[in-house]
Amino acid sequence: MNIKTRPTFTPEFRLECAQLVLNKGYSVREAAQAMNVGKSTMDKWVRQLREELAGMTPKAPHS
C-alpha cells in the first residue's frame, strides 16, 4: 500500500523561495516552477513573509 506524504521544507528553503518573489522580482508562478513547489504553497510562503516583515505575528501551524 502506497501512502503519499507531503514533502517537508525547511524554514530556510521557504524563506529563500519567498525572497525570490519579494526581493528578486519573480512572479509567484515563476518562483514556484523554479523551486519545484506548488503555486498555492508559494503563495502561502510569500504571504507569510510579507506579514512577518510588516510586524504581524505568525499563526501557529495547524497539525
Image (spheres, rainbow, N blue to C red):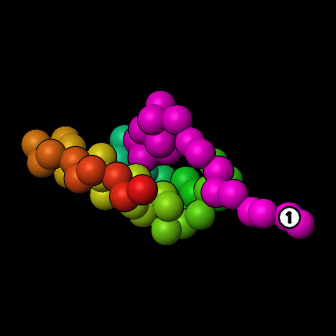
Q: In which quadrant will I find the C terminus?
A: bottom left
Camera sees residue 28: no
Q: Is residue 51 left or right of residue 24?
A: left
Q: Is residue 4 left or right of residue 33?
A: right
* Residue visible at 10% across and 42% down in the picture: 55
Q: Within 10 angstroms of label 1, few (less than 14), some, or many (20 or more) residues?
A: few
Pointer 1 residue: 2
Camera sees residue 5: yes
* Residue visible at 23% across and 53% down in the picture: 59
Q: How many marks?
A: 1
* Residue visible at 15% across and 45% down in the picture: 57
Q: Which residues are magenta?
A: 1-20
Percent position of residue 12, x then y: 47, 31
Residue 5 colored in magenta in the image = yes
Percent position of residue 27, x then y: 47, 60
Q: Amino acid at mark 1?
A: Asn
Q: In which quadrant will I find the N terminus?
A: bottom right
Eyeballing the image, is 27 above or below 20? Answer: below
Eyeballing the image, is 11 above or below 51? Answer: above
Residue 17 colored in magenta in the image = yes
Find the residue positioned furthest to the top.
Answer: 12
